Amino acid sequence: MTPKQRFLSALNGSLPDRMPVTTHHLMPSFLEKYHNGMTNNEFFGRFGLDPILWVNAHKPDEAKGAVYDPSHVPGYLEPRRTVCEQWRVVCEPLPHERYATMRYTFVTPERNLTTVLQSNEHTSWVSERLIKTKSDIDIIAKYATAPLCDVDEVNRQADEFGERGLVRGTVACFDVYGQPGCWQDASVLFGIEQLIMETYDDPEWVHAFLQVLHARKETFLASTKGARFDIMELGGGDASTTVISPSIFDEFVAPYDTRLIATAHAAGQRIVYHTCGGMMPILENIADMHTDAMETFTPAAMGGDTDLLEAKRRIGDRVCMIGGFDQFHFFTGCTPETTRQAVRDCFTTAGEGGRYILCPSDHFFDAEPELLEAFADEARKCVY
């Protein structure tokens, strides 16, 4: 099989020739530190993994007056930003003794909204939340642009990639910094602790907030019809059960993302639901959303709760499972034989009957080359 055929077999529930093996995001700092800045494709070729091409191609809704932001230079995995006369983004560097710090001001006719991001060589994070008063969501609902999918650009990249691997996209996140899922986007914009409290104190407002974010994402997903993604990511870690309860998931997460999955399916797209963290109490809840695949199945030794064998028993005949590998303990500080055994354990517990793609539980910042070689080589020996 080609890598693409192998991935699609796992996603569609048929049996591939062997267990697909890949990784999630390859972080630029990792590629620079360990591999002299090689490209993603060079990395996949170097280690013999099944490649993934991430494509985030947005375009403005010209019928609503949107254009590309002329001042925006897209960052890591970031699509081109869309703006309009009533929704502009101004970026301003702020002094900080340790971290690169940027203030983003969303300029609207009524009032401006601001957020601050900080970054180090590995990642970025929010240090000032965008939503500071509850009426701020009304500003977003009234003025924010909703990007469309640039179908032609997606298909151009898919044609160029060919059979080399999986073409993967992301449901549109909020401008500057966001997450694919509605709840997760809200968590970034408002703060997860405050958002959890408001589910008890003012649930009507939380639902109104989620509906604003849902509408923007639904517009994007409806526009993906004809785009040759193999799968698109929805969700995020703030909906894991190491962060929120199953009851909050059922009331504030599942209803909105279930509707997005239905919209994606109507547009001909598959969805993988990403839940880094705890998953075991809500495995069936996520599968009931009719997602095509689930990730990351983070092991307990990494802060998750996954029993891979139990997860396979409960939902393995309903969705493709992606992940389950402990990259923290088996990509550094152990022998190649130990890494090989960890790979074999994943295959024997989750690989039966297919519907499984071996992958680290999310991205990583450190990995010893000889352990990556053992990881990939042992996976290629896991044949059906």
Image (cartoon, rainbow, N blue to C red):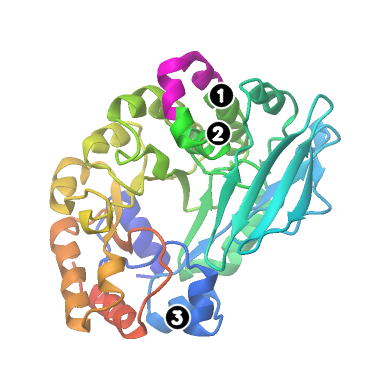
Mark nearest the camera among 2 and 3 is: 2
Which residue has dot 1 on it? 209
Which residue has dot 2 on it? 190
Kind of residue sitting beneath label 2 = Phe
Q: Quadrant of the C terminus?
A: bottom left
Is there CB contact under 8 Å for labels 1 and 2?
A: yes
Which residue has dot 3 on it? 45
Is 57 drawn above or below residue 139 in the view shown? below
State how far apart marks 1 and 2 are (Cα).
Answer: 10 Å
Q: Which residues are magenta?
A: 196-208
Q: Earlier in the sequence, mark 1 or mark 3?
A: 3
**Residue 86, numbered circle:** none
Callout 3: SS? helix
Kind of residue sitting beneath label 1 = Phe
State how far apart marks 1 and 3 are (Cα).
Answer: 43 Å
* Residue 120 can be seen in this image: yes
Residue in front for this viewpoint, 108 or 291 = 108
Picture residue at 52% right of the left edge, 64% below the top: 53
Callout 2: SS? helix
Callout 1: SS? helix
Picture residue at 21% right of the left edge, 70% below the top: 343
SS majority, magenta: helix
Q: Position of residue 116 (x, y in %)?
A: 66, 47
Q: Quadrant of the N terminus?
A: bottom left
